[in-house]
């Protein structure tokens, strides 16, 4: 292409992207997390739009940032004292170009339209990267599970599902867990859905208990998958988990199984956290204790030091990143690792970061890490193992089969390797020199965009 024509093309793309982003901000005022997620993707799509203007001409970019549907609803329930409580429920059905809407449910007091839309938007590209036939959705509620009795959790889940059941189904929209939603909540919601439909539609939810249609390996999949992905990235750069010091934030589902797999690969986990603070254990975190506290007893992480007197508890959650480490895995929540934390990690000689949580690093933190050539595994690629195994759970439910754990785990390993390979390939194809943020966004986008073009204006 002649130089002038190429420059005009670049300018046109810049203007187009600016225009789409302005519209997103105007249409979704004050939804800062959603803006942040959209901005990152739009910026990384520029090289694709330069090479393939058809995505602009067909209006794919302005379509992909607009959810197909956003449902909000009232969730009334009665607490232990007989008082009425009213929460707000959400489901965003973002994109169904390559399969039924698929994505988790989050129960946390911070949940609002911005959080649900950012998560649903990320899911488009993540789900596409898995190579599985799944579209993108996300949902949840501002319900706070902390301090609630089991009965209150059940009542809330039932009320939430009474409304949500009108909008989901094994071929339309398949929710799963996320923050505050694990096997217990999925069980109560599945029970209510089954009662309302008078039918056993096992594939309507994933992350179910193994005894009623869940997949072996789903519980571990996000954490293991993150470590498999980071391991690929390390191997590709002549490094490994073996003998490395690792800091993992959070102590929930993703965090626990990331720690487990990293330990299996020879790493020493020196710190983990919950929202009340972090623990540092110079001997390496004892996972049996963390599992007992978190999976069985619903305790705070500070209790860990009672069983391990050499360990210390610090009540500032965000200061976990000041612990020197070779590899950092943020596995708690969005924007938990900011520029200041990234600066400290770099000063302390960190070699790699793997995002187990969704959007855990702020944009300026990512810039610091990339500028310093720290190996960086972005969330959409690194934490895709969870939803990938959810898709395998759907496949098993459709076939009325249950695969052995080794089969699921081998499939997960192959999927994570392939996501790494594809993300890296796309980054080189579009002149981003191994930048996996750009590579993953592009590789995820292209499949969905092509499907959208094939299906016409709908
Ligand atoms: P869990 O509820 O099991 O655990 C969340 C952990 O993060 C807890 O330790 C929690 O502490 C901590 N945390 C949550 N919110 C905050 C906050 N605002 N500030 C500080 N700490 C916080 O959730 P998951 O492990 O399932 O999810 C963790 C992350 O991984 C989320 O970003 C989620 O979207 C993402 N993810 C999850 C997948 C899955 O399969 N579950 C798949 C892909 C991504 P506390 O208990 O004190 O609240
Ligand atoms: O963010 C995510 O990918 C999840 N919470 C898992 C979604 C799923 O459908 O398994």
Image (spheres, rainbow, N blue to C red):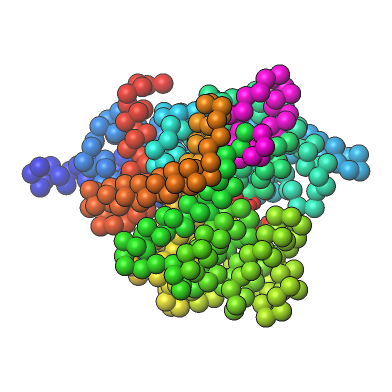
Residue 106 is drawn in which quadrant? top right
The residue that appears at 29% across and 34% down in the rendered structure is 56
Along the line of sight, the residue nearer the viewer: 234 or 217: 217
Give residue 48's position: percent from left, percent from top: 26, 42
Q: Is residue 37 visible?
A: no
The residue that appears at 36% across and 39% down in the rendered structure is 445
Q: Is residue 52 visible?
A: yes
Residue 205 is drawn in which quadrant? top right
Q: In this picture, is 301 found above or below 96? A: below
The quadrant of the picture occupied by the C terminus is: top left
Q: Which residues are magenta?
A: 189-212
Instruction: Report the residue that reaches farthest toward the right.
Output: 81
Side of 270 relative to 309 (left or right): left
The residue that appears at 42% across and 76% down in the rendered structure is 349
Side of 204 relative to 26 (left or right): right
The quadrant of the picture occupied by the N terminus is: top left
């Amino acid at each position: 292409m002649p130089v002038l024509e190429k420059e005009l093309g670049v300018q046109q793309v810049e203007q187009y992207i600016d225009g789409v982003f302005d519209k997103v901000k105007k249409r979704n005022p004050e939804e800062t997390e959603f803006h942040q997620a959209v901005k990152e993707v739009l910026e990384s799509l520029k090289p694709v739009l330069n090479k393939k203007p058809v995505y602009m001409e067909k209006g794919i970019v302005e379509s992909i940032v607009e959810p197909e549907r956003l449902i909000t609803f009232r969730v009334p329930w009665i607490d232990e004292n007989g008082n009425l409580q009213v929460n707000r429920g959400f489901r965003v059905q973002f994109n169904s170009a390559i399969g039924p809407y698929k994505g988790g449910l989050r129960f946390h007091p911070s949940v609002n339209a911005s959080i649900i839309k950012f998560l649903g938007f990320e899911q488009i590209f993540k789900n596409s990267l898995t190579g599985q036939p799944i579209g993108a959705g996300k949902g949840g509620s501002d319900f706070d599970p902390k301090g609630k009795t089991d009965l209150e959790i059940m009542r809330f889940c039932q009320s939430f599902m009474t409304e949500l059941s009108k909008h989901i189904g094994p071929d339309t929209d398949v929710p799963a867990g996320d923050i505050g939603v694990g096997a217990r909540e999925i069980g109560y919601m599945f029970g209510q859905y089954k009662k309302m439909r008078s039918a056993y539609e096992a594939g309507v939810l994933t992350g179910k208990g193994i005894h009623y249609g869940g997949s072996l390996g789903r519980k571990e999949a996000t954490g293991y998958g993150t470590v498999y992905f980071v391991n690929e990235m390390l191997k590709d750069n002549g490094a490994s988990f073996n003998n490395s010091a690792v800091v993992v934030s959070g102590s929930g589902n993703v965090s626990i199984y990331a720690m487990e797999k990293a330990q299996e690969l020879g790493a020493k986990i020196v710190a983990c956290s919950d929202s009340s603070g972090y623990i540092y254990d110079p001997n390496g975190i004892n996972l049996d204790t963390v599992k007992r506290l978190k999976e069985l007893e619903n305790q705070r992480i500070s209790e860990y030091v009672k069983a391990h007197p050499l360990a210390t508890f610090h009540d500032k959650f965000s200061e976990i990143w000041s612990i020197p480490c070779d590899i950092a895995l943020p596995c708690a929540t969005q924007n938990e690792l900011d520029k200041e934390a990234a600066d400290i990690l770099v000063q302390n000689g960190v070699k790699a970061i793997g995002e187990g949580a969704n959007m855990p690093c702020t944009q300026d933190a990512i810039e610091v890490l990339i500028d310093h050539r720290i190996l960086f595994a972005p969330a959409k690629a690194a934490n895709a193992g969870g939803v990938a195994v959810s898709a395998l759970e759907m496949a098993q439910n459709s076939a009325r089969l249950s695969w052995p754990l080794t089969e699921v785990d081998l499939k997960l390993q192959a999927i994570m390797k392939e996501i790494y390979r594809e993300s890296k390939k796309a980054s080189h194809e579009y002149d981003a020199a191994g930048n996996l943020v750009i590579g993953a966004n592009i590789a995820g986008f292209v499949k969905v965009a092509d499907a959208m073009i094939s299906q016409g204006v709908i």
